Amino acid sequence: MNIGIIGAGHIGGTLTRRFSALGHHVTVVNSRGPETLAGLVRETGATAATVTQAAHAGEVVVVTIPLGKVPDLPKDLLAGVPDSVPIIDTCNYYPQRDGRIDDILNGMPESAWVSKYLGRPVVKAFNNIYARHLMENGLPPGEANRIALPVAGDNPRHKQIVMQLIDELGFDPVDAGPLSESWRQQPGTPVYATDHDAEGVRRALQEASPERRPEFRAA
């Protein structure tokens, strides 16, 4: 599968390594230019590209940048990208880094905000796991203590593709409902930055509260 990854930070770099090792072809971009990705390209065989090239290179596109930088992406970034291509959003809102975003502070789920800016439906995934755990802790299907990851989105086919990739990476995908419910996996919720199994993820999603903790609100 051809996968475009916009962002080469902790999660983006990890997904580049993991997907490449599984035989997928990854086109990856960062904010500093393709030449700065030479080491990652040598390590993985991925292709370094511009942001537009990465967005148009894949059968899946992953957006994994600081949430506050999403409005800086080209407004027509996904123009011409087929509707069949799932757009995965891994972004999390940290007000100390991203600044005040009133829509989110007033209750809009983070991924709904990302979807609004991109002008496309997104699938929320890979946002609640540490990059090191994503790199090292995958297990074969059926293994005890296999970590599960929540997946929220409105397009069943897109979700299924993303869930298949999660399983391929060594984790149990858990359907977390529509994008409107993706707040249940945002920072500060019981499922965030935890390594639950599938049943634990389902329980944590149900226990989530829409009220943000003080550290995840902008002053």
Image: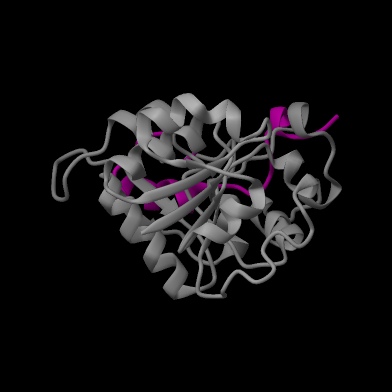
On-image quarter of the N terminus: bottom left
Of residues 88 and 208, the one nearer the viewer is: 88
Asked whether, in this view, residue 146 is left or right of residue 53, the answer is left
Q: Residue at x 73, y 30 (%)?
A: 214
Coloring applied to the structure: one colour
On-image quarter of the C terminus: top right
Q: Is residue 125 visible?
A: yes
Q: Is residue 121 above or below residue 107?
A: below
Asked whether, in this view, residue 206 is left or right of residue 104, the answer is left
* Residue 95 counted in the magenta span: no
Q: Residue at x 29, y 29 (%)?
A: 136
Residue 32 lies in what quarter of the image? top right
Provide the residue span drawn in magenta. 191-219
Of residues 79 and 189, the one nearer the viewer is: 79
Residue 120 lies in what quarter of the image? bottom right
Q: Position of residue 79 (x, y in %)?
A: 69, 68
Q: Position of residue 118 (x, y in %)?
A: 71, 60
Q: Is residue 130 visible?
A: no
Of residues 126 and 23, the one nearer the viewer is: 23
Q: Is residue 70 above or below residue 96?
A: below
Q: Residue at x 47, y 51 (%)?
A: 205
* Residue 202 counted in the magenta span: yes
Q: Position of residue 52 (x, y in %)?
A: 66, 54
Of residues 23 and 160, the one nearer the viewer is: 23
Asked whether, in this view, residue 5 is left or right of residue 1, the answer is right
